[in-house]
Amino acid sequence: MTDTIANPKLEDHPGSNTEKDPQDWVSGDDPMTGAQASYLTTLCEEAQVDPPAQGLSKAEASEMIDSLKAKLGH
């Protein structure tokens, strides 16, 4: 009798570990990335709102991006 270990790659609907609450990120307190700052600027222009202060963390920037995307219907 052999023991088998389930391989999530072979499951029809494996759970996802790619989405995590930004507040739970290990690097969430790090400064936002250049890519986040650029994308936020673009979204803010499209939504006609003032861009955020440069002092946002990665987690704060991610949450703001999600909020603007929802507002804009992206």
Image (tube, helix red, strand yellow):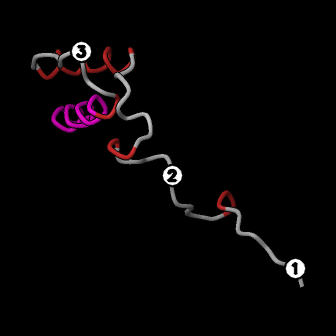
Amino acid under label 2? Asn
Q: Which residues are magenta?
A: 60-74
Report which quarter residue 58 is drawn in: top left
- Badge 2 marks a residue whose secondary structure is loop
| Distance of label 2 from label 3 (alpha carbons) | 29 Å
Residue 62: image location, x then y, percent: 31, 33
Task: Say which quadrant the C terminus sits in.
Answer: top left
Helix, strand or loop: magenta stretch: helix
Other residues around mark 2 within 10 Å, as few (<14) / some (14–19) / many (≥20): few
Mark sitting earlier along the chain (3/1): 1
Task: Say which quadrant the N terminus sits in.
Answer: bottom right
| Distance of label 1 from label 2 (alpha carbons) | 28 Å
Mark sitting earlier along the chain (1/2): 1
Amino acid under label 1? Thr
Q: Which residue is found at the position 41% from the left and 41% from the top?
A: 25
Report which quarter residue 22 is drawn in: top left
Residue that mark 2 sits on: 17
Q: Which residue is found at the position 24% from the left and 15% from the top?
A: 54
Mark 3–mark 1 contact, CB under 8 Å? Answer: no
Residue 6: image location, x then y, percent: 70, 68
Task: Identify the mark at residue 54; answer none if there is no mark.
Answer: 3
Residue 28: image location, x then y, percent: 37, 35
Q: Nearer the viewer, residue 42 or 34?
A: 34
Residue that mark 1 sits on: 2
The image shows residue 70, relative to residue 37, as above or below, that is: below
Amino acid under label 3? Gln
